[in-house]
Amino acid sequence: MIVETGHYALVLALALALVNSVLPIWGSVTGDRRLMAVAPSVALMGFGLVAYAFFALTYAHVASDFSLANVVENSHSAKPLIYKISGVWGNHEGSMLLWVLVLALFAAAVALFSSSMPDDLRANVLAVQSWIASAFLLFILLTSNPFARLANAPAEGNDLNPLLQDPGLAIHPPLLYLGYVGLSITYSFAAAALISGRIDAVFARFVRPWTLLAWICLTLGIAMGSYWAYYTLGWGGFWFWDPVENASLMPWLAATALLHCTAVMEKREALKIWTIFLAILAFSLSLIGTFLVRSGVLTSVHAFASDPQRGIFILLILVVFIGGSLALFAWRAGGLKQGGLFAPVSREGALVLNNLLLTTCCATVFIGTLYPLALEALTGEKISVGPPFFNLTFAPLFAPLFVLMPIGQNLAWKRGDFFGAAQRLIVAIGAGLIAMLALAAWRGGPVVSVVLSGLAIYVIVGSFADLGRRLFVGGGATAIMGAGQRALRLPRQAFGTAFAHAGLGVTLLGLAATGWGAEKITALRPGDEVEIGPYQLTFESVQPRAGPNFAERIGRTAIRSSGVLIATIEPSTRFYPARKMNRSEAGIATIGLGQVYMSIADVAANGSVNARVFWKPLVSLIWIGALIMAFGGCLSLSDRGFRIGVARRAAKAAASSPQPAE
Amino acid sequence: MLWVIFAILTGFAVLSILWPLAKTPRGVSRGASDIAFYKSQLAGIERDAVQGLMTPEDAQGASAEAARRLMALAEPPLERSVAGAGRAVRFASIAVLIFVPALALGLYSVIGDPARPDLPLAARNEASPARMDLMAAVAKIEAHIAQNPDDGRAYEVLAPVYLRMGRGNDAAQAYAAALRLLGQTPERLALYGEALIYAANGAVTEEARKIFEAAAKDPSLAKPRFFLGLAAAQDGDLLRARDIWERLLAEAPDNPPWAQALRERMAAMPGAPAAAQNESAARDAPAVEGGSGAKANLAAKIQAMPEAERSSAIRGMVDALAARLAQNGQDVDGWLRLVRAYAVLREPDKARAALVDAKRNLANDATAIGRIEALGRELGLEG
């Protein structure tokens, strides 16, 4: 009964989404505030219904209800509980349901936390959100229904793809979807602003927190996915320029650009067209990513199901939403009023440059991802655009971004002084140069690593230069005394910016350090020793071990540093009988900020294995950097200027005082 | 109960729309929100200036800009007259009241399955202790195999259980392991082949056929010979299938239990003994067995006719096909059908003649010639 009520709730959610697609817009066009007031109430109800449907599917997975095709195909009664739950979205149908759940969640959040938003803006935003929800609910119900039942329930399910049986699945997709789908809100804001024709600083003020929220989730989601790939795929790599990874990177680049752009728009009412365009672009790229992953155009771990009908449906959604919004954009863009003016060298100018570089990066990734597909579709020729292409195109575009980032932070609004800003960065530049020289002398190694490390240090120090200047105004002892007080008064946004930028620098440092790593591929027998970087590894034994739904062979390996045992790792190969699949699990020991990474394969009867052993200095900084970026985002989000309910009090004050407008 | 819950859910959904429509709206108008925003911006600038976070000149410029925008705000549009709005609200309410339940129930009745209860595993296990024993036994053997992957006997015990549970693929893999570990015997091969057929949803795959051919070297085994007959029947070669099965029945020692079932199967075959065959039935043999499709219906109809009538009906169709091919000889499939039909009608001379005609007509199409010749070989008409 739970299953069928869940199914019905999903159908009902579609009916509500369709209603909410029409009534609020009708209200905003005719100025009827009752019709507009429908939007938040229905958005909350819709979220409740989708959440119930999601609960029902989760229940079916947990209870191993094999009368559902979805459960049969992706679950197994012996699977551990956590994978029974995460398996709900570890498949095509369930992940689409999660997508819609997040969509509904964001709509509900807007409904709850935006009582200060102008009625018509909120009504239009929620209506556009409902269009998207309607399209995806239709897609789910007509082509990928997770509630499809089987006439004869089999006794046992087929189990989940072992690659997905990992705690990563519990976190990575929900986070990524919060980011991906969170961008739907910025899209809805842009479309709503275009419909009402009101594109101004107020719009930017309300769209900013949502963009930031989506960006934080996307950052964490991508980092999480990258770490997951790192420890389960066993290649020791963390980013493969795989099209599916690129599909998440493109919205991130666009969202990052958008984030910076809305700052300009709120402060100066400039860059309106560009902001709207980026808001549309960011979500369009999310949709394209969904299309790439879900349609089966790409085959990878992520392509759970390939079905041409689904592909066409998503393509249709893509065309309608991207085409429709661009048409709206073309219709309104001409009538936009000129915003605030600024000189080329100014905070605004720097942000424009940042936007240009980020969107160019985004375009590069886009071409690199889609060109092979297009070529294959047109000529049947298969080419592969791999890491060399991206490393050669992406890196030169991103490098100037790193150089300019601290400078932009130190430029004044409207009209800045480039040399002044550079002067303020003298400490950062010095730190970077010293780091470079020190590393060159101490470690030597590849020039690229040395240069990029220096750049990273410059970025990290430079990110705090502006903050430091504002805290220690004037210099001298009194300035230091007053710094604490000033720190409390400074908007948290300033700290947020500094941390987010520094986080990027930290990630860059982790990336740069890969050049000093070491890699060995070797056959090992129990008792063998292997040197990697500064450590000695002893491959002690191969032992069988039984997991809940797999059997594994673990290769116990001791790590010693000049004879002293510092860690023991257990890389393993696992066999999942239900799917007859093998999977490796890397053994990782984090030593300082670096990691010793080992994966084994082809365990022979006499205990010999093929092993890949890596020493990766500072590698954990890659993900720590992402965490710092997200932390910076959270700091900014908690700033009063960002707080979602912020203008509520102010609006109430305005409404209570006798204003001519009310 | 289910429908009561549906009704409650629908009620809540409709209410979530009607409630705000009935209430007096209490939102923030555009004007109020705009004013609040610029005022807070001005206040922010002032705060920053006081705290020394902004130079006085910058603060002055910024606040002048914000103030200019505040003053430039357009007058908010006047609210529509209540009467006009009221009509829209009434219309919307009625539309929603009809649309939401109609769409939800309509769509659900198409895609939903209200009669099917939840079927959690725990409840199913409680319902049949025998099943639980089976599951427990399977789990035990699986665990044993995980520890002793070289125990072929365990695979042999597990495989038939998998088959009973409908897990054809698993059964086939288990038998394959048993074959590998315990060595090939005709019995084991036959069981493996049978599991392969289960795994392929009843189709005798090429792989399975080869296995049965190997297993059939022991003529005392009925299973491989039965499945070889089935393979022939699925290929459309009913003559051969009948031949294999007839010999199997004749050589069976003393009326084994499966004989009756096999006889019934043979009797149900299109063109049972003495009856003439017809081309479409021969071609659609598997479809007739499955009992679907227009052709199958036609075949069934012909099957139902009295003997003489049936014979003439079939002959009429074959003659019509021959006449059509005489007019236009470029139809490979037509020729294939005609040759097969003559073979089934036990008229080998006509079949051979049709083969020659076909080759002449399709002389410049190498693949077609290949197919025709292959059929000739298959039916033993060559030479």
Image: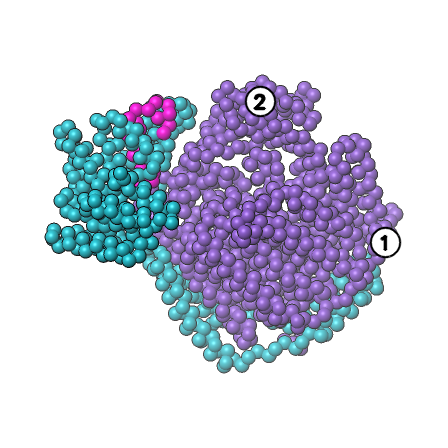
Chain colours: A purple, B cyan
Q: At 54% from the left edge and 41% from the top edge, which residue is drawn?
A: A168
Residue of label 2: A524
- Between A543 and A203, the one lying in front of the other is A543
Whole-percent x, y for residue A247 in the image = 58, 50
Please indicate, yes or no, whether residue A60 appears anywhere in the rendered image. no
Whole-percent x, y for residue A44 in the image = 50, 60
| Earlier sequence position, callout 2 versus callout 1 | 1
Residue of label 1: A419
Q: Secondary structure at mark 1?
A: helix
Please indicate, yes or no, whether residue A238 appears anywhere in the rendered image. yes
Horizontal side of A656 relative to A339 (left or right) equals left
Whole-percent x, y for residue A135 in the image = 48, 60
**Main SS of residues in magenta:** helix
Mark in front: 2 vs 1: 2
Q: At 26% from the left edge and 38% from the top edge, which residue is drawn?
A: B383
The quarter of the picture where the C terminus of chain A appears is bottom right
